[in-house]
Image (tube, helix red, strand yellow):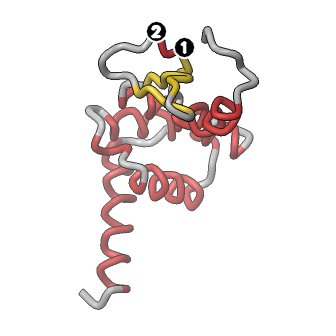
């Protein structure tokens, strides 16, 4: 980044940018797909969003850090919770998302689909449908 890192906008958005796996850039480095953020009418920084597949890898790595171990070492119930969280975050709309998640969890694609289907059935029962 070329702008001062002590700018209040940088401090405000950095946790979000880091959580998304995005990249902070100077506004002069912005490309067409980047998001330029202004502060009081002046372009202060640009955010380069990650590709969806990179974002999924970033989310999986963050979940491993949160659990303190590789996702493949989690128990079945915790893996199901991971799949619920990933589904809510749109992980399975990414091309090869199920395969990527299955690999990270150390389970088959079939198992991931079972976890997803079980959650959908539970929601249907709870909503009376």
- Residue to which mark 1 is pinned: 26
- Residue to which mark 2 is pinned: 29
What secondary structure is marked by label 2?
helix
- Is residue 6 or residue 22 the one in the foreground? 6
What secondary structure is marked by label 1?
loop
Image position of 32 with respect to 16: above or below: above
Q: Residue 12: horizontal and vertical position, in percent?
A: 66, 39
Quarter where residue 120 is shown: bottom left
- Is residue 6 or residue 120 the one in the foreground? 6
* Residue at the image point whose x is 36% and y is 67% from the top: 118
Q: Is residue 93 left or right of residue 50?
A: left
Q: Count neighbours of disc 2 (C-alpha within 10 A) and say few if under 14, some if 14 to 19, many if 20 or more.
A: some
Quarter where residue 30 is shown: top left
* Residue at the image point whose x is 52% and y is 25% from the top: 42
Q: Is residue 18 left or right of residue 68?
A: left
Q: Count neighbours of disc 1 (C-alpha within 10 A) and say few if under 14, some if 14 to 19, many if 20 or more.
A: some
Q: Are marks 1 and 2 in contact (CB under 8 Å)?
A: yes
Q: Residue 40: horizontal and vertical position, in percent?
A: 56, 35
Image position of 84 with respect to 73: above or below: below
- Is residue 109 or residue 93 the one in the foreground? 93
Q: Residue furthest front?
A: 41
Question: Distance of mark 1 from mark 2, alpha carbons?
Answer: 5 Å
Image position of 3 with respect to 21: above or below: above
Q: Residue 122: horizontal and vertical position, in percent?
A: 37, 77
Quadrant in the picture for the N terminus: top right
Quadrant in the picture for the C terminus: bottom left
* Residue at the image point whose x is 37% and y is 25% from the top: 51
């Amino acid at each position: 980044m070329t702008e001062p890192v002590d700018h209040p906008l940088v401090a405000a958005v950095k946790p979000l940018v880091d959580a998304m796996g995005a990249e902070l850039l100077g506004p002069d480095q912005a490309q067409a797909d980047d998001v330029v953020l202004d502060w009081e009418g002046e372009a202060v920084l640009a955010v380069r969003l990650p590709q969806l597949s990179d974002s999924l890898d970033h989310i999986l790595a963050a979940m491993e850090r949160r659990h303190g171990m590789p996702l493949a070492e989690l128990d079945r119930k915790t893996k199901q919770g991971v799949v619920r969280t990933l589904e809510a975050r749109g992980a399975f709309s990414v091309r090869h998302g199920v395969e990527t998640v299955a690999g990270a969890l150390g389970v088959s694609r079939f198992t991931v689909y079972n976890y997803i289907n079980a959650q959908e059935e539970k929601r249907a029962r709870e909503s009376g449908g």
